[in-house]
Image: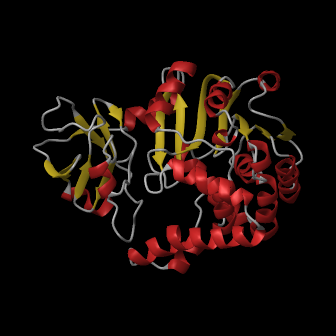
Amino acid sequence: MTQDTLRFGFGRNWAEFVDKHLSDKVIEASMAHLRQVLKRDTLNGLRILDIGCGSGVHSLAMMRLGADEVVAFDYDADSVVTAERVRAWAGINTGWRIEQGSVLDQAYLERLGTFDLVYSWGVLHHTGDMWRAVKLAATRVAPGGEFYIALYSADTYVDPSPEEWMRIKKAYNAASPMRKKLMELHHQLVHIVLPQLKAGRSVLQAIRDYGSRGMSIWTDTKDWLGGWPMEFARLAETRDRVAKDAGLEMVHVLNGEGCTEYVFADPTKNAHWAGVNARRQLIGLSGPYLHSGGYGFMAKLPELADRSDDGAHPKRSTLMLYEDGKPLGLAHAIHDVIRNRGQGRFSHWQDWLVFSASDNTDPNLNGHTYTYCVDY
């Protein structure tokens, strides 16, 4: 089968999600996530481009946060129809435009103009030409604007590896409807149910609370298994490419279980992110660091235990570790992966900061300086 033959019908999946799950609670979850990542209470006065708008849920969240205008487009015609349904459900008649288009169509993008915020969550890695899509999307950022993208993380997917997930996705898209359902159930058992049980947490509660951006567990499972074409991105490469191609600095990053979320801006031209950076107090991390095996080292931070990750709060910590003044970004990593893979992964766990150097050297000897920000 060709790549186009296997292409997943994201729009049909989003239509099913809207039919079954659309509610004000879903929109509020998306609004809360946007506030968290963008570190803004409102989007008042902003003109926003939503690339690959999918269901339209995030566009609606932006409108409710006060955006002056949202221009949303998607390659998938079914997604466009679904987003239009969501707009009608919300009763919004002005300020929100929805179109069909491709981020790889440079002429189309240029006709749209530039925007204060260019947003694309979990889309650009499905275009078949990810880095070109990232580069073209960044051209739509107005001077002093912000670029918010989420890409599948090659740093997170260790076992199974990115290569194995590519094989699984091809198999899913070529499977019969019954085989697809079995693969969905197997995925949820292995990657959701068993980890919850192993950690002593409630599976039912995890399902109820699933999806900080307003996703449902079933929609996300099908989206993940079916998402094709696709590519993976490493944090360091993404940071460096956007800096080189667009002249934008990585001002915020959240390393999640699937996608890593990035916000890029030029703090010399963006007062909001200049202010955020000014409030980020960097505290020196002092050695000697305790070797925990492989590439892993540990520093004790008992004074931050009530803000760290633990079994009941696996993603609570907002601590960011810096190496030579640059955020490493690979937070909440599994400790075995820190020890075995390193490359700047870290975990703020209970009384400890477990970490690795970006170049897998011994932080006691490598000459790098390590600092941390408690509330990144």
Question: In the rendered view, does 225 fall on the left or right side of 237?
Answer: right
Q: Is residue 121 left or right of residue 69?
A: left
| Image spot of residue 122 (x, y percent) | 63, 46
Q: Position of residue 350 (x, y in %)?
A: 26, 62
User: What's the residue at 76%, 48% (across, down)?
Assistant: 1
User: Can residue 118 be seen from the camera position used here?
Assistant: yes
Q: Quadrant of the C terminus?
A: top left
* Color scheme of the displayed model: secondary structure
Pick whichever, 129 or 249, lies toward us: 129
Residue occupying the point 67% across, 39% down: 44
Q: Residue furthest left?
A: 288
Number of numbered discs overlaid on the protein picture: 0
User: Does residue 166 appear to the left or right of 346 in the view shown?
Assistant: right
> At which x and y percent is residue 233?
52, 39
Query: Please, is residue 182 above or below residue 106 in the view?
Result: below
* Viewer-proximal residue among 191 and 242: 191
Corner quadrant of residue 245: top right
Q: Is residue 169 above or below residue 112?
A: below
Q: Depth check: give the residue in front, 22 or 149.
A: 149
Residue 223 visible within the image:
no
Q: In this view, does 233 lie to the left or right of 358?
A: right
Q: Which residue is drawn at 68% across and 25% down?
A: 136
Q: Where is residue 26 in the image (x, y as percent from the top left)?
A: 69, 63
